[in-house]
């Protein structure tokens, strides 16, 4: 039985590996920066967990650092990119509901929190697209990828 191989996402982007890589790097830049900042200032990372009511704060900070850096590495390396993208989509959605609660904020803070909330929803959408495109590529290439 003959199967027709369709182009992968990278091939569909007009062969521009540089554009593809730059887009992925820009998409995960905030998570790389956040993970590295938390790693460099670990007491600050623990304080951030406590600020948002995430206890026990120490393991939550470690998990957040591992998630931000690990999922970013998956996306950038191309290895299980779809999984890294789904992890960051879920993390971003949860963090947005936790940190950008514009509906419960005083009027003076509402505008900025609402903007941040919907900007983060845009990131969630971008991660879902990356996951979907990579999953399609993975299915077409087979599980050896």
Image: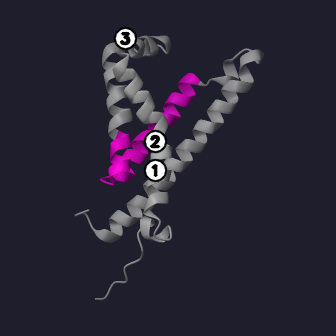
- Kindly indicate the quadrant of the structure image that contains residue 69: top left
Mark 2: secondary structure: helix
The picture places residue 117, in percent across and down from the top left corner, at: 63, 32
Near-viewer residue (66 or 29): 29
Residue at the (61%, 25%) spot, across then down: 100
Mark 3: secondary structure: helix
Q: Are marks 2 and 1 in contact (CB under 8 Å)?
A: yes
Quick check: is 79 in the magenta stretch? yes
Mark 1: secondary structure: helix
Residue at the (64%, 31%) spot, across then down: 116
Distance (Cα) linking label 3 and label 1: 30 Å
The picture places residue 63, in percent across and down from the top left corner, at: 32, 26
Residue at the (76%, 16%) spot, across then down: 108
Left or right of 77: which side holds 123?
Answer: right
- The residue beneath circle 2 is 28
The picture places residue 43, in percent across and down from the top left corner, at: 37, 11
- The residue beneath circle 1 is 24
- The residue beneath circle 3 is 43
- Kindly indicate the quadrant of the structure image that contains residue 45: top left
**Nearest to N terminus: mark 3 or mark 1:** 1
Q: Are marks 2 and 3 in contact (CB under 8 Å)?
A: no
Which residue ends up furthest to the right in the rendered image?
Answer: 107
The relative height of residue 39 versus residue 78 in the rendered view (above or below) is above
Q: Residues within 10 Å of mark 3 (few under 14, many from 20)?
A: few
Numbered range of the magenta stretch: 71-99
- Quarter that holds the C terminus: bottom left
- Kindly indicate the quadrant of the structure image that contains residue 3: bottom left
């Amino acid at each position: 039985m003959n199967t027709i191989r369709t182009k992968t996402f990278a091939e569909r982007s007009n062969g521009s590996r540089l554009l593809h890589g730059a887009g992925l790097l820009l998409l995960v830049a905030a998570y790389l920066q956040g993970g590295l900042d938390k790693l460099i200032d670990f007491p600050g990372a623990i304080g951030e967990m406590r600020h948002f009511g995430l206890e026990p704060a120490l393991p939550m900070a470690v998990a957040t650092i591992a998630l931000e850096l690990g999922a970013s590495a998956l996306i950038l390396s191309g290895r299980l990119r779809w999984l890294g993208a789904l992890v960051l989509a879920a993390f971003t959605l949860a963090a947005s509901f936790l940190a950008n609660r514009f509906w419960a904020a005083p009027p003076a803070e509402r505008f900025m929190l609402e903007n941040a909330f919907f900007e983060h929803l845009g990131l969630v959408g971008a991660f879902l697209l990356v996951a979907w495109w990579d999953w399609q590529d993975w299915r077409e290439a087979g599980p050896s990828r």
